[in-house]
Image: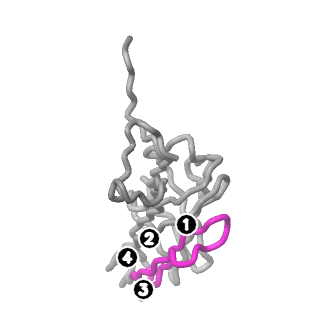
């Protein structure tokens, strides 16, 4: 009897990126969309070019959320770009990043690189989004907008094993 193995993660995870890039962000604020699903487990629901990532699992836990994006502007002067993680339509406190970009004579002269690395408690049907506002029109660079959401297995304190977790074939959720 042959045992078939697959190369898929056993913990809930999703990794998205925007291959095309060039999404525009203004003072009104827009939510990021991603056109490429690099990989995802069935624990997440996401359709390409949507701005919402929904958690489908019937359990709750801590998730690591990583967002990265590079911005550029063609508008003369300095521009402030603010990105923030949203959970169920509300901004998550402490999950914000501010970068600055500038341009002269209709050519981008600087590129602002935003990075947010945050741990958040999520429950089933929670929705994650990333919103960006900019004082001048800014664009995301191609293949620079990335979002990774990954479950963090937590079992509690174990004094006997020095706090180490031993999976031994068990799937932790």
CA gap between label 2 and label 4 equals 13 Å
Residue 161 seen in the current view: yes
Q: Say which element carries label 3.
A: loop
Give the residues drawn in magenta, as a range.
75-101
| Of callouts 3 and 2, the N-terminal one | 3
The residue lying toward the viewer, choosing from 152 and 91, is 152
Q: Are marks 1 and 2 in contact (CB under 8 Å)?
A: yes
CA gap between label 4 and label 1 equals 17 Å
| Of callouts 1 and 2, the N-terminal one | 2
Residue assigned mark 4:
112
Is disc 4 surrounded by few (<14), some (14 to 19) or many (20+) residues within 10 Å? many
Residue found farthest to the front: 160
Q: Which mark is nearer the camera, 4 or 1?
A: 1
Residue assigned mark 3:
76
CA gap between label 1 and label 2 equals 10 Å
| Of callouts 1 and 3, the N-terminal one | 3
| Of callouts 4 and 1, the N-terminal one | 4
CA gap between label 3 and label 2 equals 27 Å
Direction from residue 36 to residue 92 in the image, left or right:
right
The residue positioned 56% from the left and 40% from the top of the image is 42
């Amino acid at each position: 009897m042959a045992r078939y193995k697959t190369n898929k993660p056993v913990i809930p995870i999703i990794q998205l990126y925007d291959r095309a890039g060039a999404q525009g962000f203004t003072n009104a604020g827009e939510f990021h969309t991603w056109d490429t699903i690099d990989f995802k487990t069935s624990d997440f629901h996401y359709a390409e070019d949507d701005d919402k990532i929904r958690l489908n699992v019937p359990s709750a836990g801590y998730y690591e959320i990583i967002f990265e994006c590079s911005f550029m502007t063609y508008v003369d002067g300095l521009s402030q770009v603010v990105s923030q993680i949203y959970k169920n339509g509300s901004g998550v406190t402490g999950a914000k990043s501010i970068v600055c970009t500038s341009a002269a004579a209709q050519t981008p002269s600087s590129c602002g690189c935003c990075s947010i690395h945050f741990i958040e408690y999520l429950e089933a049907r929670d929705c994650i989004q990333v919103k960006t506002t900019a004082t001048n029109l800014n664009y995301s660079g191609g293949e620079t907008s990335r979002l990774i959401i990954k479950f963090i297995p937590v079992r509690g304190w174990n004094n006997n094993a020095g706090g180490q977790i031993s999976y031994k074939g068990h799937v932790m959720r």
